Image (spheres, rainbow, N blue to C red):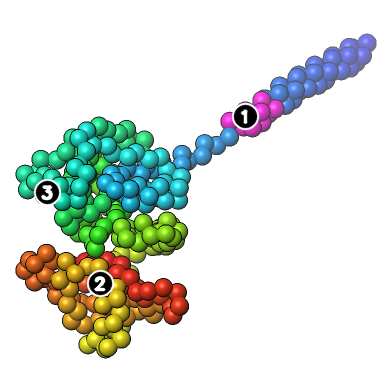
Amino acid sequence: MFRNFKWVLATASAISLSVMFAACNEQESKTEIKKDVAEVATPAPTPAPTKSVVVYYSQNGATKKLAEIFTKAKNADAVELKLVTAYPSTYDSTIAAVKAQRDSRQWPVLENAKPELAKYDTVYLGYPIMFGSFAPPIYTFLDSNDLGGKVVVPFCTYGSGGRKASAAELKTLEPNANVTLAFGISNKRITAENGAEVAAKEVESFFADLETGKTDEMLLGGYSEQRPLTAEDSAVFAEATKDYAYLGLKPLSVATQIVAGTNYLFVCEMKAFGGPATQTNVKIFKPLPGRGVAELIVVEK
């Protein structure tokens, strides 16, 4: 009898343990299911995409055309800076107004001097070159905003040059920003019939240079040593600079770089607008035979 009682007790205990283990297993299974569901429902966060904005001032439409190329290439937002009082309609009057602003350092008032920039990591800053550097409205923008900690990519349009000088001044004015290599193209080239297509290809190459950390010094690599001009060099120079007599350019020597055509880097004496002689570099590109005429790319000190 006692043995039977112990057997019944043992059997009851086994059943209780079995029920308890089953309940625990069921609870663990439910916990695992909940955990699995939670893991599926809350995936790991992904890094926020880098945000960029194109901020630009355009005087005659050339910089606006270039800004649109940058905006499309980077899928960026865009802000066009607008003057409260526009410059005069004639070239000479505009030059006089800009000169007065530069001499007095009284910069023009903008309708939108302080766009919302906090959400952007990169600012593509576009402007026309006036008197060798960026146009006065850009000074107003820089005085009104803190670009510290941002990547600032300058781009410009110009009559003959000013890309490097404007980028150097921008670095001085914005020491806490990462001011990169600058892009530039002449008004004549971007407003030509195929100007937008030419500019888009050059902008694409420019971004490739940025991504690989190229500098202006590195981009000058691949040229031959400077040498005296030949008759052919002189003819190329004359063809490309025929519309720039006001610069008073006199070629002294030349280096070349063979690409899909030929890049020429002339060291010149320059007496711009009859001023004192200075030494400058003139870059000219001559396409392959039958593909166009030699054209001035940039004049840079």
Q: Can residue 8 be seen by looking at this rendering?
A: yes
Provide the residue designation for mark 3: 96
> Disc number at residue 242?
2
Amino acid found under the numbered disc labelled 3: Ala
State which region is magenta.
Answer: 32-42
| Sequence-first disc among 1 and 2 | 1
Q: Is residue 36 magenta?
A: yes
Provide the residue designation for mark 1: 41
Q: Quadrant of the C terminus?
A: bottom left
Q: Where is residue 88 in the image (x, y as percent from the top left)?
A: 19, 42
Camera-side residue of 164 and 278: 278
Nearer to us of marks 3 and 1 is 3
Q: In this view, does 209 lie to the left or right of 233?
A: right
Q: In this view, does 48 lie to the left or right of 155?
A: right
Secondary structure type for disc 3: helix
| Sequence-first disc among 3 and 1 | 1
* Label 3 Cα crowd, 10 Å radius (few <14 / some 14-19 / many 20+): few
- Disc 3 from disc 2: Cα separation: 25 Å
Q: Is the magenta stretch mostly helix, strand or loop?
A: helix
Residue ID at (58%, 34%): 43
Q: Position of residue 41 (x, y in %)?
A: 62, 29
- Disc 3 from disc 1: Cα separation: 65 Å
- Disc 1 from disc 2: Cα separation: 69 Å
